[in-house]
Amino acid sequence: MAEAIIRSQQLSNVTPSSSGINADEDQNGKIAYWGKTQLKRHKKLKYAAKKWRQTTQAMIDGSDIVVVVAPDIYASMKNKWHIPKQKLHVWNVHDLEETINAERMAMTEKNKAIVSERIYNQLDQLTNELLVTL
């Protein structure tokens, strides 16, 4: 979602891309249902990546900034790839199911909608804060 949020701003000096540490597994298709729902709701779906991209060292090396959305993802990455500290931003945004389980909420459609909106808003705020620093 963060990539789509940034792309929607159509900044000439920023070229966002996103990738996954296990994207080759393609567990949710090109975009998870609730992520797609939020991007559609906020009129940013057309800016979303068309397919998953697997993270590679070459991708990291060619990037000015590397954002890792959650500390647990960074923990999985740091033994696979070298990410220079000056490029690295580790956020604390967790996926839908993880958030619902951590908050001991029932896995209902209503709660999924509430949490996915909260995740979208968190990503929107963090991407905007990051863009101000560029």
Image (cartoon, grey):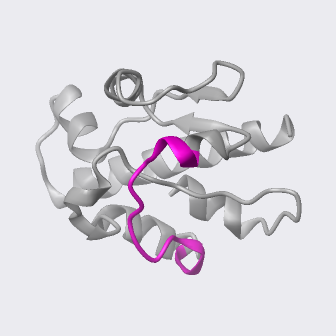
Give above or below for 111 relative to 109.
above
Percent x, y for residue 126? 64, 38
From the viewer's perspective, tell me whether residue 108 is left or right of residue 9.
left
From the viewer's perspective, tell me whether residue 71 is left or right of residue 84.
left
Residue 50 forms part of the magenta stretch: yes
Predominant SS along the magenta part: loop
Q: Quadrant of residue 34?
A: bottom left
Residues 97 and 50: in front is 50
Percent x, y for residue 15? 73, 60
Range shown magenta: 45-59
Residue occupying image coordinates x 73% and y 45%: 128
Instruction: Identify the image quadrant of the C terminus.
Output: top right
Q: Quadrant of residue 7?
A: bottom right
Q: Check the image and name the residue furthest to the front.
A: 58
Residues 43 and 27: in front is 27
Residue 20 forms part of the magenta stretch: no
Residue occupying image coordinates x 14% and y 54%: 108
From the viewer's perspective, tell me whether residue 123 is left or right of residue 81.
right
Give above or below for 49 relative to 100.
below
